[in-house]
Amino acid sequence: MNIFRKWADRPFAIALAYLNFSIMKHLSFTPLYLSFLALSASAETVSTELEPLIVNGKAESQIGDAASASKGQTSALELEERPFLRRGELLESVPGVIITQHSGDGKANQYFVRGFNLDHGTDFSISMDGQPVNFVTHAHGQGYADLNPIIPELVERLDYWKGPFFGELGDLSTAGAAKFRFFDVLPQGIASVTVGEDHFFRGLLADTIDLSPASGAKGEAPHERSGLTYALEYNDYDGPWKMPSNSERVNGFLKYFKESGQDRFSLTAMAYTGEWQSTDQIPKRLIDDGSIDRFGNLDDTLGGESNRYSLMGAWDREHADGRSHLDFYVGYYDLDLFSNFTYFLDNPDTSVDESITGNQFEQKDERWFIGGEARHQWDLGEKNTLTVGLQTRSDFLNDIGLYHTIDRERISTVRQDDVTVSTVGIYATAEYHLNSWFRLQPSIRADAFHFDIESSDPANSGNDNDSIVSPKLNLVFGPWKETEFYVNGGYGFHSNDARGVTIERDPVTGGDAERVDPLVRTYGGEVGVRTEALPNVVSTLAIFYLHSDSELLYVGDAGTSEAGPATVRYGVEWSTYWRPNEWLMIDHEMTLAEGKLQDVGADDEIPGAVPFTWSSGIHLGRAEGLFGTLRGRFFSPRPLIEDGSEESRASFQVNARIGYRKNDWEVSLDCLNVLDRDDNDIEYFYESQLATETEPVSDTHLHPSEPRTFRVSLTRRF
């Protein structure tokens, strides 16, 4: 474990790491130990069994519960009904979120929401059973969030928020947040096989072993149940690419769960490993002149591999006047990624072979991460509550690096660093009902960060500390005739890549480099309405505004994000869900957004900011018999450069599923990209140079959407 010894002389980082380990220790070995929290030590515990978890879908009532029009929840049933090309599209159940990909299947997806091009996750926080998915100071971009470790069938619900209005949400959550919750106990065991075109294969086995004591067993406490949920998934896919992607993924999942009286405890182990070959974005000029196919490539040695292993624990206790929660996570992650976005724009090193030029580069990330949360909620009567929480996290990065490569062989080092990023956040949120039609939810959050960098260039080494306080306020009016109105406002923030916090010398040019602010202030507001006045219909409308003091912008020819100028965004989001009975569900979601760079003159367009998105679907089917789903998703042209002179194409994708269920057997057929449209998943505009060109050419570079494809699934539930 020499990775930890490198930080032995850094008191602040060690203090935060010790706090993380303490949370893990108390939860793992003494789950009933609460003396470190005076807030719960004096609470009188109840002796009744915990209330069953109720999972509402988007068509279910949230009046009296939600604090904003854009807060929502998706159930396992709704996720199961959605045909999807890649598992990242689970997040498209969040209104206004669009998921695409700009290279290999093993990478994190590209995220778009409310006029944000979020790259691989910046400003949109994602977690799974309390463990953050996003990685700070990541080799491929700040906030990198890879959803490949998630097995879709294990997701019990998905909670989502928009805007910086909620005290429990901290770093990277200005645009919004999503929290995946996994089943403690699966409703049924699952054995599933899916096969499809382009050598697609997926196999899944998952079940819960019931470990609950027999009813009335001597010496056993009443109201006790426990179980062990396991899952193993294998996925292989070549894709439509001229160079097969050979994408291979293995996921493992093991969760122990116990509920006894007022206590609920779980311990979860997750493992993910994947490798792939990449067809990166390619220049449009070569497609136009017929030099290469839309699914062709210019470098057949691109790709990567990644692993993520983690252990998570959670404990909850119900009290007579509130509830306590404690969780922890600890894990290991690595990524080795080879990319080439500019081809032969320059020659990084001719000492190996003067005839070889190219711009292939390697991004290497390896880290241990650890953290957790402790919170307590007091019930103050009349539905009033007060919640206080503490969150902490430390990432220990070993030799995070950027290298020039040829055919995946390193020829020079751009930079290599050991990095520690540690943070502690505390928050308090109250909910107070002034009367039957007005409630308010004030909250305040304070975060402290420590950055420590040991760089291959001593000029770029150093450390820094920063802190920020973020007040928030939500006002809720109603309900009147099954309708509530919301006014939300708040401050938030995002952290920047630690390497930019202490930088002095540009590792590429050798010239002076400008440091970035460790923490960047954001703020926003929202006015909305939620109505359930029509039977079986839930409809929400939200008008939003967001400001960021510095935007994290994706740089297409560098494959990473960097701090840019301030931005503002405003727009409207409208969603409607109709479930008239158990066998029919219709939904409609639409977002209009306008975004501008600030203080940059006339060229103020935000590259990649999507002004209009639309999603709609219909699902029909009972528990047994025929069922089917049809979904459409559209996102409009968007500016590719600041002056707006270059725009992307629009994209309209339709997916469909038809199937039959009987006696716990299910067979289904998915048709993805039903219309077989030649859309593009992503487009960028920048300079590149081919081997046959004598000078750089500014051009659109694109990654095409996959053509129409069919997949057949056979599932047995037991």
Image (spheres, helix red, strand yellow):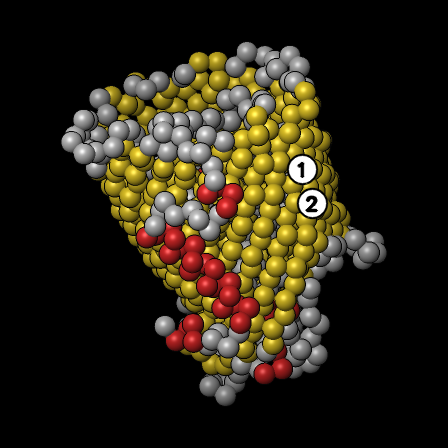
Across and down, in percent, residue 42 comes to 47, 40
Which corner quadrant of the image does residue 448 belong to?
A: bottom right
CA distance separating discs 1 and 2: 8 Å
Q: Is residue 661 left or right of residue 417?
A: left
Please give the residue where the numbered disc 1 appears in the rendered image.
Answer: 442
Q: Amino acid at mark 2?
A: Pro
- Above or below residue 490? Residue 380 is above
Task: Residue lying at the far bottom in this picture: please name it.
Answer: 351
Across and down, in percent, residue 56 comes to 46, 26
Q: Is residue 415 left or right of residue 466?
A: left
Q: Amino acid at mark 1?
A: Pro
Across and down, in percent, residue 5 comes to 43, 76
Please give the residue where the numbered disc 2 appears in the rendered image.
Answer: 471
Q: Is residue 473 left or right of residue 65?
A: right
Q: Is residue 429 left or right of residue 710?
A: right
Q: Residue at x 41, y 33 (%)?
A: 45
Q: Residue at x 50, y 58 (%)?
A: 393
- Above or below residue 717? Residue 266 is below
Tell me the number on the disc at residue 536. none
User: Do tag 1 and tag 2 residues touch (Cβ < 8 Å)?
Assistant: yes
Q: Residue at x 50, y 88 (%)?
A: 351
Q: Quick check: can you spot residue 659?
A: yes
Q: Quick check: can you spot residue 574?
A: no
